[in-house]
Image (cartoon, rainbow, N blue to C red):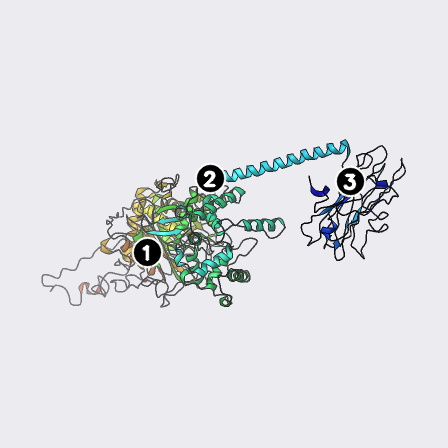
Amino acid sequence: MNSYGDSSSTRGRAQIPGQHGDPGGDASGDGWSAAQEGTAPGGRAPVAPWAAAGGRASVGGSAAVPPRGGSASGSASAAVPPRAGSAAGSASVGSASVGRAGPGRASVPVPPAPGVGRAGAGRASVPVSPAAGGSAGRASVGSASVGAAPAGRASVGSAAVSGRATARASVSPVSGGPGGGPGGPGGPTGPGRGGRGAGGPAGAGRSKKRKRVNMLIASFAVFIMLAGLGVVGFTYYSTNVVLPDEVPLPLSTTIFASDKKTSVARLGNENRTFVTIKDIPEHVQYAVAAAEDRNFYKHSGVDYKGIARAAWNNLSGGDKQGASTITQQYARNAIENLKDDSYARKVKEAIFASKLNEKYEKPEIMQHYLNVIYFGRGAYGIEAAAQTYFAKPVSKLTPAEGAVLASLIKQPVASTTHKGYDPAVNLPAAKDRWDYVLGGMVEEGWLNAAERPTAYPKVQPVAKDGNGFGVKSPRGNVVNYVRQEMEQWGVCSDSGAAGKPTCVDVLRTGGYRITTTINAKMQDALEKAAQPDRKGSVLNGQPKNLMAAAVSIDPKSGRVLAYYGGDSGADFDYAGKNTNLNGDIVGGHPPGSSFKVYTLAAAIEAGISVKSRWDATPFKPEGFKDKVQNAGRTAACGESCTLEESTLKSYNVPFFHLTEKIGPDKVVKMAKQAGVSTMWTVDPPQPFDLVKEKPEDLAPSKFDRVVGYGQYPITVLDHANGLATLANDGVYNKAHFVLTVEKQNKATGKWEKVPGTGEQRKPQQRIKREVAQEVTAVLKEIPEKNNAGLGNGRDAAGKTGTWEHNGTPRNAHAWMVGYDDNLATAVWIGSRDTKRPTIVDKNKKDIGGSSFPAELWKRYMDDALKGKDKSDLPSVTGIGDDKAGNGKEPPPPPPPTSPPDCGPLGLLCPPGGGNNGGGNNGGGNNGGGNPPGGPTAPTNPIEPRPGGGNGGGGLLPTTSPRPGDD
């Protein structure tokens, strides 16, 4: 039993009678009386006893009751004034229905005044009389503070008396305040506030229904909570955590030379150097924590406060935030299956972070994190970032520099919505982020405010990126060809094929081990000879616009053994195809006379003998603006030049006639069969895929008769592939760069070949053997006569080529191509400066095929063929029709003349010569030798000066070749 009914209790009761001393209230009665100390007669207002509360409590009230059968409203008030110096509190009174329920009671709890010993709170009860025939309802009155509390009100809910009635209890202060009096607020005639009680069977039914609904809702909520806890618990105990030493980082791809030892390139982590925590200054560690996770040293791997803060910010419409800790970020970057953005991933990430935190100390976790995270510009890990942005090791970073790197982590590269925090790209945002990091360090006590840097440090500029892929070395272009072959095998796609990752991503993160066809020693020899700016190279010390490109292929397999197209795989490839900013395929160079090897092969295949004779006299074909000439030279053989001689001396006019006879489409077809895959028109420049197009559809409409002597551009790689086919007696092997592609089995650790990849040789006899051998037999005479004879008496076939710049007399492209049984190599020299397209040496002399290109070809071939067997190349057979040409037969030589018989001692001949001035019309040999028009001695194989055996005979004078000549 509570103490409210106990007169000796510290919570004494003051009883207030209703109308005529009965419970309830009357419309006009004022039968309210002051309560006695410690007593509770009649209606009750429980208050602290005067002795305890130190004041007087009185409760008065009235209820207005209308006549029966009608309705009226009434009010009841209870005033409990405290002693002087105290204030009255207030309480609210509920409502009850009068007339439908039994006698009710409105109670007002009244707290004791402060400092009143152990006195408790009193309660004021206001009985409300029901209407006739009904029982009184009950109204509940809220609490009021009595004592030192400020004045307030206690409102009593309404009770209906054959209608509605309102009762109010108020607690007023001792003086100067409202309430208490009969006419004041809350008094007998003052205003009241009504409510409705829950009485009767209907109310009880509604109450039970509400209870059942509430029980169902509560049960469902508990079920959901338990289910969620179960899922999280199961995930926690079933997740196998891979510790840092075993974590499979984003796997790099290593590309090897054919020896499987020499590295051609490392992709994915080529710019990552692992460091230990002792190499990372503390201020760098603190900068990272200030940027990414300021509670890193406090939480257990998951920052639950941060999660709540981020969730509230996201729900309240602020900027979207994450709450991943450094440990969670490390997990996400290190574990492959934590890279999606699902809630399941977030749960696993949090579990991984928690377990990781249990196993490792904070410095160890920070070490692994800083070795994994990406900082932009291709830099993975803090050491690579320090080198990339500040050209120094991480151990030498200043606090200002460390803060720059820390500020990059949030977004190191630009996106469609934000430019990122690279200072070279978005300096204002980078500085703001930098200030945020330094401010966090000061706030956390990791940096003295007086030592806080104020000047933003100088950052290295962004390096030239070119195509954005590959490595910045001469071997970088090999990586680009590896990528192309990976796409051909369906491993990846650079053309956006559905369901295929990009080849760039595959090579950077796929963890492949790729063995290429590149011969490490040959590659090194080619780079030493070809790199223009390398000390000791052929072009070193020459004009800076000069550029070389060269490709070397194994004729028997099609393997590319050495490749040089420039000093960076991220820039223009001068040996292969490129895509310019407009999306056009570019990269070909006019091959000039070096293309005649295919024209010669096409002629022999058409049944024309190399002994056939052709007219080399310059002329102007119908529809041509200029004459077809022999590169500014006059052919000594005139109208009777053999096809063999025209090849050796590189006369253009006979090859024009030859192409016209067999058809330019036959020349294009032969080049295609040999291995030339792409050829460009000149005006406008447009590439055509010879593999897909029919030669008869391209020539002569796209490629006219000048195709016979090399006007139309092709790539160095294609040219080398074509020569390799001729060197292999007409058997074609497609040039390729990859031998094997392997990937590590995660279960066994063994390297296994990726299905459908690797070298796939399909040799084809595309050119008749006898045709290829006859071409080789003619070409083997050229190197020796063009300053390119190989050392140690090796046989080799070759051909030079030169093309002028837009019809000017100055050269723009110079070639030397050739082969033996072991190796086929094509060399091109041109300009890398579009503003200086012509090629001259430092002495201002034109560069032709027999100068720098021949020198480079010879130097490389001599180095590359060391230890290789010598080749025994075939000799000319003359197969085919030797009457097929348009030239004239040479005049027969004159019969030899017999000297006169002058007797044994020569005494029978008259003085002054035989025939007395007759015979040879002038006596003797008329100055010696043969008569005019007689046979001539062999001339210089490059270029004879015009002339004949006129006026004295003897050997014809010769000139050295013009520097720009073939």
The amino acid marked with disc number 2 is Tyr
Q: Report the quarter where the N terminus lies.
A: top right
Tell whether 560 sits left or right of 51: left
Q: Quadrant of residue 84?
A: bottom right
Question: Which label is found at residue 526?
Answer: 1
Near mark 2 (Cα within 10 A), the count class, few <14, some 14-19 or many ≥20, is: few
Q: Position of residue 89 (x, y in %)?
A: 74, 51
The residue furthest left is: 904
Per the image, label 1 sits on a secondary structure element best described as helix
What numbered label is drawn on residue 250?
A: none
- Between disc 1 and disc 3, the foreground one is 3
Comparing labels 3 and 2, the label whose residue is closer to the camera? 3
Q: Position of residue 625 (x, y in %)?
A: 47, 57
Mark 1 and mark 3 lie on one chain; the one further toward the N terminus is 3
- Specify whether residue 56 is in view: yes
User: Badge 3, how many Cα within 10 Å: few under 14, some, many 20+?
Assistant: many
Q: Which residue is mark 3?
A: 105
Residue 483 lies left or right of residue 418; in this view the side is left
Spatial CA span between label 3 and label 2: 59 Å
Alpha carbons under labels 1 and 3: distance apart: 110 Å
Could you tell me which secondary element the residue under label 3 belongs to? strand
Residue 914, position in %: x, y? 18, 63
Mark 3 / mark 2, whichever is N-terminal: 3
Q: Which numbered disc flags the more N-terminal residue, 2 or 1? A: 2
Quickly name the residue at label 2. Answer: 237
The residue type indicated by label 3 comes to Arg
Q: How many marks?
A: 3
Dot 2: what SS?
helix
